[in-house]
């Protein structure tokens, strides 16, 4: 019997005994994690994606995400047990499942408004096949009110059924971070669940309790749950912006922000963040716009949230300015400068390049007409660009006039000024956008101009002397 | 032998054996904590203050701060052992001591610029009596550069000695919070120490290691240490402002910010703060201006820091607007409204009313000409005001048309809507500026309009019904 037609305990029992089929709509980074999580709990999972290459890999029992290589063993296990099917046929997935989980991403339009098209399409697809007793859950981060005001009416209209009466409806945001997705989903944080009726809430909370190991937090409405997920992102965005602003002051004062931050954070009420060269990825730079839009509709101006976004967007430009100044400082003609760009992903440990500051830096370098060698240990290709991506930073650094570090992959923490200088084989600028280099002492073979973030710039000489410089 | 003339280990030994006298310049909340801390380590402490009443109490072995009543036993113990002397004679304290600790507060001028006068006066006093081998430490929160560019030249000029050569100079910020000052100083956080020479740093770090139990963090300069203390405050101020902004949105959306915050903070990268009715006290509302001023001198605009300050300053006005709207909602003539104001201190658990939003609320009520009964369990008097301060909130609530809760003293968490309504004996508005009331169900004797922060407003009826209202 369908899950919303039996007692929650019985539904859990059915889930464990593989009597339910769970459709995951959107089988990217997030969807795959959800699928594996529910599969491990016993569900028969149908993952839906239009990415043919991902389907091929998954059908061979392989994780399509290099930073999530450990998932392969679970994928293979689930496939062997017949608990994981992958398809590009959303209509089939909608028809064949009892529990439907929406995991398609919502992006911004060119006017920086949330574009709900993917959610609407999937809701329509689900609505057309919805049967009394089904469960619909949304895990995608969406503007507050979307479940109640957008998804619910579509489901009801297409199916002729009533949410919370004929089928269960819940919003339960994924809270995963590339590189550790499965542990994030199953073991690290409680699962947030918001519904607009006790019936839906009790069932969906019970089901998730059987999937995740860290318990659930029941929220009083779908809107509250949608809001909490976005607020997590706003907190981070605002605090990164604050770090950027304070780091800039530290640079001017000749004080190291890192040192100040570590001291401040030695008491438990301070959580100063790291500064950066802009915030990338599909989450932090996007969610503030969802909530800003929601607020505007309510007649509220989120001043700090808006300002933070603008500061973080400017951070990449400021770093590019530093690159220009550094090249100028070394008397190199920018168009003739040989660049090494280390890192393409939006942060270390992921192959995700969505909204990555590194791509904007790459575009800038390409515009100058300069030569550039690119390295990233995880990124395999950049959409729309035909560039060779080296795996080893050393190859990229060979003969470079300027080494630009734009992601904090763990491999880059091994970069030492002395080795970089020898590889460059000439006077060189190192633009350390992630402060991966901690040792600024030593004797480089050639003069090195070191420029970090929230640190004074230094000119490092072959005799081991070091002096602060203003760019 | 004076501490800066012997090896640091020997200086510690001398401190422990009560061979050193430590002068604490400014013996208020902060200074007293420092004095007790150093006294317990073995130092002979001379505390200096102009507050005659505090001197009288201290000489009787009593803590002048009700929220720090537990200090009395240490004060008495130190007095009995001859390790604590209190005086209003700063010149005597300067002459008679080997280690001089500055703990006078720095406030803002009417133009919101740091007024360094107290630091300058004390530095002059110390400079006049400074002897080779002495140690000078500043614990007051001050704008970055003050130790190096203000205090140091004064000490050198008045004494004819050289800092870091003839005497040790350090900046080591207090990080205490009213109510738990001694534990904060001795047991909770590492002690931050910044010096501009290794000699001063080694000595002062050793000395503090003998005073505090949580170790020390050595910083590379006095400026870095000054900066870290202010950044702690800026982090809090900005995050309170963010909470205020998001809480306001929640009110408009009809969602409870508290619930959203708790869910968001269930993952360890989110530290959303509580919203409020303005930030009070001598620290958080003041430090951002120190750092804003420093930044302006460097040609840097701290946009988020400035905006946060303005949002937090506006928060009190917004709450006062809510009071006006609530009174209007109940059709009461504001000038004839009987107010109960619960809480005068800037937060619960302290008697400190400096920059307290409650005082601005009190002024507003007084201006309307309305009657007001005031309650605070810790505050004994308000400078410049001749008002009776009741200890029990129940007395203040009797016959009130509007009960305004402005501090989160622990006693106020016991307030229940039903009891408040019975005490009021009439239709009443409860303006809960600190969200101390959690149970909004129940049957009040009379209709209650409940208005919190970051929550929808509710009209609570005697029959137990509850409905959201827009003010």
Image (cartoon, coloured by chain):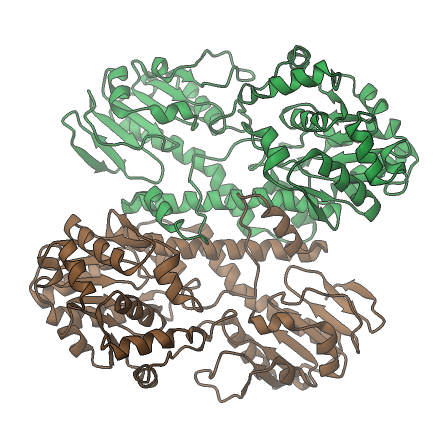
Chain colours: A green, B brown
Residue B411 appears left or right of B221:
right
Residue A68 appears left or right of A419:
right
- Residue under the point 28% across and 73% down: B26
- Residue A222, by quadrant, is top right
Residue A333 appears left or right of A21:
left
User: Residue A125 at what x, y percent from top left?
Assistant: 82, 26
Where A386 falls versus B276 (above or below)? above
**In the image shown, does A149 or B191 lie closer to the viewer?**
B191
User: Residue A54 at what x, y percent from top left?
Assistant: 65, 15
- Residue under the point 58% across and 19% down: A65
The C terminus of chain A sits in image quarter? top left
The N terminus of chain A sits in image quarter? top right
- Can see residue A297? yes
User: Residue A358 at what x, y percent from top left?
Assistant: 46, 26
Number of numbered labels in the structure image: 0
- Can see residue B297? no
- Residue A394, by quadrant, is top left
- Residue under the point 87% across and 30% down: A130
Residue A355 appears left or right of B42:
right
Where B403 falls versus A45 (above or below)? below
**In the image shown, does A192 or A458 lie closer to the viewer?**
A192
- Residue under the point 50% across and 78% down: B378
Where B64 falls versus B243 (above or below)? below
């Amino acid at each position: 019997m369908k899950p919303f037609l039996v007692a929650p305990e019985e539904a859990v029992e059915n889930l464990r005994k593989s009597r339910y089929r769970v459709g995951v709509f959107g089988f990217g980074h997030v969807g795959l994690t959800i699928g594996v999580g529910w599969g491990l709990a016993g569900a028969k999972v149908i993952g839906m994606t239009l990415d043919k290459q991902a389907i091929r890999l998954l059908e061979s029992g392989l994780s399509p995400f290099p930073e999530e290589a450990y998932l392969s063993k679970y994928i293979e296990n689930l496939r062997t047990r017949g608990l994981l099917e992958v398809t590009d046929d959303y209509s089939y997935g909608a028809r064949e499942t009892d529990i439907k989980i929406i995991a398609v991403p919502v992006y911004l339009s060119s006017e920086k408004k949330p574009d709900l098209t993917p959610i609407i399409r999937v809701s329509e697809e689900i609505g057309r096949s919805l049967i009394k007793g089904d469960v619909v859950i949304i895990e995608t981060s969406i503007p507050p009110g979307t479940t109640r005001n957008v998804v619910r009416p579509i489901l009801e209209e297409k199916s002729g059924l009533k949410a919370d009466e004929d089928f269960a409806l819940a919003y339960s945001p994924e809270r995963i971070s590339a590189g550790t997705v499965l542990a994030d989903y199953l073991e690290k944080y409680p699962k947030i669940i918001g519904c607009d009726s006790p019936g839906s809430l009790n069932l969906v909370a019970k089901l998730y309790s059987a999937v995740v190991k860290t318990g659930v937090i029941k929220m009083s409405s779908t809107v509250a749950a949608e809001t909490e997920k976005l607020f997590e992102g706003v907190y981070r965005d605002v605090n990164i912006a604050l770090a950027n602003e304070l780091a800039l002051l530290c640079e001017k004062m000749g004080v190291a922000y890192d040192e100040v931050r570590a001291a401040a954070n030695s008491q438990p009420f301070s959580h100063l963040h790291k500064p950066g060269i802009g915030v990338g990825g599909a989450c932090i730079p996007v969610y503030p716009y969802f909530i800003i839009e929601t607020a505007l509709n309510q007649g509220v101006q989120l001043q700090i949230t808006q300002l933070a976004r603008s500061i973080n967007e400017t951070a990449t430009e400021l770093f590019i300015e530093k690159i220009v100044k550094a090249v100028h400082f070394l008397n190199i003609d920018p168009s003739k400068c040989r660049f090494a760009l280390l890192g393409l992903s939006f942060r270390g440990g992921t192959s995700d390049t969505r909204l990555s500051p590194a791509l904007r830096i790459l575009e800038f370098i390409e515009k100058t007409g300069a030569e550039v060698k690119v390295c990233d240990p995880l990124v395999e290709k950049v959409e729309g660009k035909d560039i060779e991506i080296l795996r080893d930073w050393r190859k990229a650094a060979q003969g470079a006039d300027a080494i630009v570090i734009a992601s904090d992959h763990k491999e880059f923490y091994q970069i030492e000024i002395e080795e970089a200088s020898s590889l460059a084989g000439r006077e060189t600028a190192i633009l350390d956008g992630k402060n991966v280099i901690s040792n600024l002492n030593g004797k480089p073979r050639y003069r090195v101009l070191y420029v970090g973030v929230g640190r004074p710039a230094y000119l490092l000489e072959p005799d081991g002397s070091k002096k602060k410089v203003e760019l």
